[in-house]
Image (cartoon, rainbow, N blue to C red):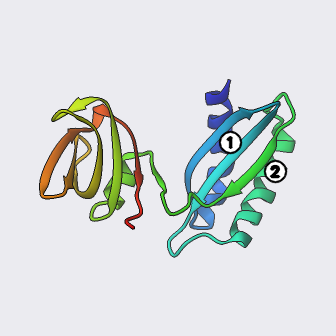
């Protein structure tokens, strides 16, 4: 059900986002306690602001009211993905080359399942991360999750 709702939300929202130069980063439909939350994360070149989020929320809310694809009550939240933006799609990894990232894998690669360092290279099949002075080539199909990481 959650994947179906995410798909419907993406299809309803994409025309508006394309028209306004906004990128859909992620959609989550999750239950927390007794409440359901539909969370939409958006971004754009130069950064997303609260007014952008408000306009996306109004547009999506109107479309969801028309289609009514979600059977139960829920809270709609539209926000920026934040400083530690998740890397979900191949294009996210391409854009993150040169950035500090955190990558976790489904199984050990070079004896490790977590890598934090600079994303040096990505070619849709391999993620190369430099951790300290060592380079790790990680098959993309073994990446469980990735995100930008803040260096303190």
Q: Position of residue 96 (x, y in %)?
A: 34, 60
Q: Residue furthest left?
A: 134
The quadrant in which the C terminus is found is bottom left
Q: Position of residue 127 (x, y in %)?
A: 24, 46
Say which label, 2 or 1, has the lower sequence index: 1
The residue to which callout 2 is attached is: 61
Label 1 SS: helix
Q: Residue at x 51, y 76 (%)?
A: 46
Q: Residue at x 66, y 50 (%)?
A: 40
Q: Residue furthest top?
A: 1
Q: Residue at x 68, y 42 (%)?
A: 9
* Residue in the foreground of this view, choosing between 88 and 117: 117
Q: Position of residue 39 (x, y in %)?
A: 68, 46
* Left or right of 27, for residue 64: right
The residue to which callout 1 is attached is: 9
For residue 30, which quarter of the picture? top right
* Left or right of 50, for residue 17: left
Label 2 SS: helix
* Left or right of 83, for residue 53: right
């Amino acid at each position: 059900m959650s994947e179906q709702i995410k798909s419907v939300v993406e299809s309803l929202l994409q025309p508006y986002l394309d028209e306004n130069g906004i990128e859909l980063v992620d959609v989550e439909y999750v239950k927390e306690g007794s409440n359901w939350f539909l969370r939409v994360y958006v971004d754009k070149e130069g950064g997303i602001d609260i007014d952008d989020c408000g306009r996306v929320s109004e547009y999506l809310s109107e479309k969801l009211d028309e289609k009514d694809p979600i059977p139960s009550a829920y809270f709609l939240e539209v926000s920026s993905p934040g400083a530690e933006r998740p890397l979900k799609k191949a294009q996210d990894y391409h854009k993150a080359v040169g950035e500090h990232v955190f990558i976790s894998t489904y199984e050990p690669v070079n004896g490790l399942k977590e890598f934090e360092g600079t994303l040096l290279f990505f070619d849709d099949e391999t993620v190369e991360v430099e951790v300290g002075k060592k380079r790790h080539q990680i098959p993309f199909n073994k990446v469980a999750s990735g995100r930008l990481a803040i260096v303190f």
